[in-house]
Amino acid sequence: MTSSPGRILLAAPRGYCAGVDRAVEAVERALEHYGAPVYVRKEIVHNTFVVESLSARGAVFVSETDEVPVGERVIFSAHGVSPAVHAEAAQRHLDTIDATCPLVTKVHKEAVRFAARDIEILLIGHEGHEEVEGTAGEAPDHVHLVTGPDAVDDVTVRDPEKLVWLSQTTLSVDETMETVRRLRERFPKLADPPSDDICYATQNRQVAVKKIAPDADVFIVVGSANSSNSVRLVEVALESGARAAHRVDTAAELDPAWFDGAGTVGLSSGASVPEILVRDVIARLGEWGFGDVQEVRTATEDLIFSLPRELRAELKSAGQSHTRGRSTSLDVAPH
Ligand code: SF4
């Protein structure tokens, strides 16, 4: 711990993105409107605190739709689902509320469009991640998963003249570009996606971390272990010059030994992390001598997504407010 006053460089933007904010509010509003239980397939967002908080209020998290009683209501998480999951839900006569982030839906639509033109898709992403399973499930005969630069040599395609790459929304921008560079060495005709698949929130959080990292003796990222974008922020901090970096779910996981001799702590949080958890970390670090908190802002975000269509319609027909907490609402139309 520091003997002289230490400072915290607090990254901005950090924490909740528009897709997470919307998905969490969808569960809250469904609980208020329908009452408990409300079933949710998979973690609505990858954050332990959020999942535990919603569970305490009556949300029931399940791994698959066949765990939801026939005829009940289920919410699909922000990470998206494949068409097969929609079909299973229909077979079980489930009422569904699809909280898939519109920016994930955009990637799904791209996959469908390219597959319809018989173009093979090199999908850069993490094996087993729910988002990747959902996107791949849109075009299983056309998608090849590429897990990173080192996996490029193992890729086999039918026609190297008809290829496009797409990606998971929460990857490291730099590592993804390296994967693309190596893919293009092997497949010079590889086409780019029509627009960035790595979403604005992932990119903005990485840029803010990069700015702070060179000054940070220790970098703390608040986020859960299964949160892809949170884990990436730790990697980005280290690659960008932080002397050490750690991910914690909550302030309770901070180890005082990490801050021995440190003067500057960098601090950020993943896109699924409520601000209260960051405030707890700031309070704990303050007790340890890091009382000077300076925000370092690299972008301003004002994107808001409206509630999922099914929930909006239900609330509207019940005469309840179906708008979001703030005054403007911005739908991203699927491409
Ligand atoms: S991280 Fe990006 S893609 Fe994922 S929910 Fe947030 S805004 Fe959507």
Image: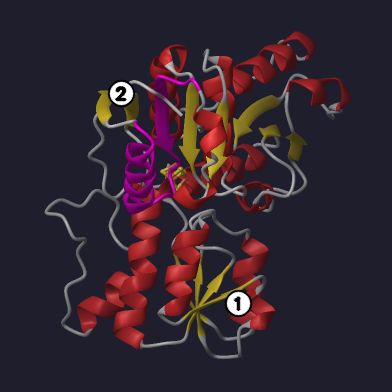
Q: Does the residue labelled 1 lie within 8 Å of ligand 1?
A: no
In this rendering, is residue 263 above or below 333?
above
Q: Residue 47: x, y in percent? A: 50, 55
Q: Mark 1 points at which residue?
A: 89
* Element class at badge 1: helix
In the image, taking residue 262 as reference, residue 159 lies left or right, namely right
Q: In which quarter of the image is the C terminus?
A: top left
Q: Residue 8: x, y in percent? A: 34, 27
Q: Mark 2 points at which residue?
A: 5
N-terminal of the pair, mark 1 or mark 2, is 2
**Identity of the residue drawn at 88% across and 26% down:** 154
Q: Residue 235: x, y in percent? A: 59, 26
**Where are the magenta residues, as a range?**
261-289
Amino acid on which the number 1 mark rests in the picture:
Ala
Label 1 neighbour load within 10 Å: few <14, some 14-19, many 20+ = many
Depth check: 122 or 133 in front? 133
Whether the magenta-drawn stretch holds residue 333 is answered as: no
Q: Which mark is residue 45?
A: none
